[in-house]
Image: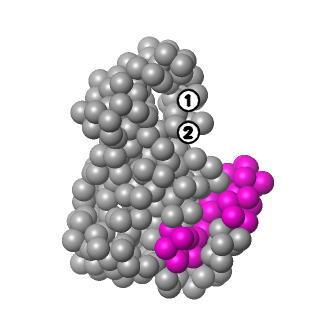
Amino acid sequence: MRSLHGKVAIVTGSSRGIGAEIAFALASAGAKVVINYVENKPAADKVCAAISGTGGECVAVQADISDPIAVRRLFDTTSEYFKQIDILVNNAGILLFKEIADIQDDEFNRIVDVNFKSVFYTLREATTKLADHGRVVNISSTVTRMMLPKYGAYAATKAAVEQLTRIFAREMGKRGITANTVSPGPVDTELFRAGKTAADIERMATMAALGRIGAASDIAKVVLFLVSDEACWVTGQDIGVNGGII
């Protein structure tokens, strides 16, 4: 795979978990990376220090991407630091693990704000601030293909992201910009484990053809491919990275 030297990437929600692993992968390939976080500055600084320690370039930028003004600031700050933006990875998200009957209005509004509106806001900024032939990868979820109780609101927001991505890909194709979603299966992160018992996690592992839950690195490798030149003919697609969960 060709390197990403000379490219600049924003990875939202990248102070931990899958986002941090994606940031490491892009930096290892030579990209300059913006580590976006909301509250956990020490964690973001730790990711940046690890990247810098291996010769990479990065900066941590605080922005609540459910706020359109903060999104604009994130893009403007990135441009000030690195002069361009070539790659956008929308990883930030929250999980609501409740049956539809039990979801409160404020909970529903929050998950829509963080998981869906944030992607809309970043894509809107990307229409004018992403370089020609840029790359967008939005993180969705395999639960959009399933009928899992307690995932109703979460799955709905991710399904909305998938459709938004397809239309963005169509609209931006004239500039050579590609946009795809990656849909992980269960991945061993703090977000995934929240609200689940050991039995829940074991049951979900057995649903995969490969018999395990995923690692964050499994997702990062696919994202790295999609932002590379090798994936220049891949756009408007949803890639399931789920160990064979159907």
Identify the mark at residue 189; answer none if there is no mark.
2
Cα–Cα gap, marks 1 and 2:
6 Å
244 vs 70, nearest the viewer: 244
Q: How crowded is mark 1: few (under 14 residues within 10 Å), some or many (20 or more)?
A: some
96 vs 44, nearest the viewer: 44
* Marks 1 & 2, CB-CB < 8 Å contact: yes
Badge 1 element: helix
The residue at the point 64 percent across, 81 percent down is 80
First to last magenta residue range: 26-50
In the image, what residue type sits under mark 2? Thr
- Give residue 208's position: percent from left, percent from top: 32, 31
- Give residue 169's position: percent from left, percent from top: 27, 64
The residue at the point 46 percent across, 78 percent down is 4
- Give residue 204's position: percent from left, percent from top: 40, 25
66 vs 133, nearest the viewer: 133
Left or right of residue 149, residue 240 in this image: left
Identify the mark at residue 193; answer none if there is no mark.
1
- Residue 31 lies in magenta, yes or no? yes
Badge 2 element: loop
Can residue 156 be seen from the camera position used here? no
Residue 206, placed above or below residue 12: above
Total residue callouts:
2
In the image, what residue type sits under mark 1? Arg
Quadrant placement of the N terminus: bottom left
Residue 39, placed above or below residue 36: above
Residue 19, placed above or below residue 23: above
- Give residue 225's position: percent from left, percent from top: 36, 65
The residue at the point 27 percent across, 51 percent down is 238
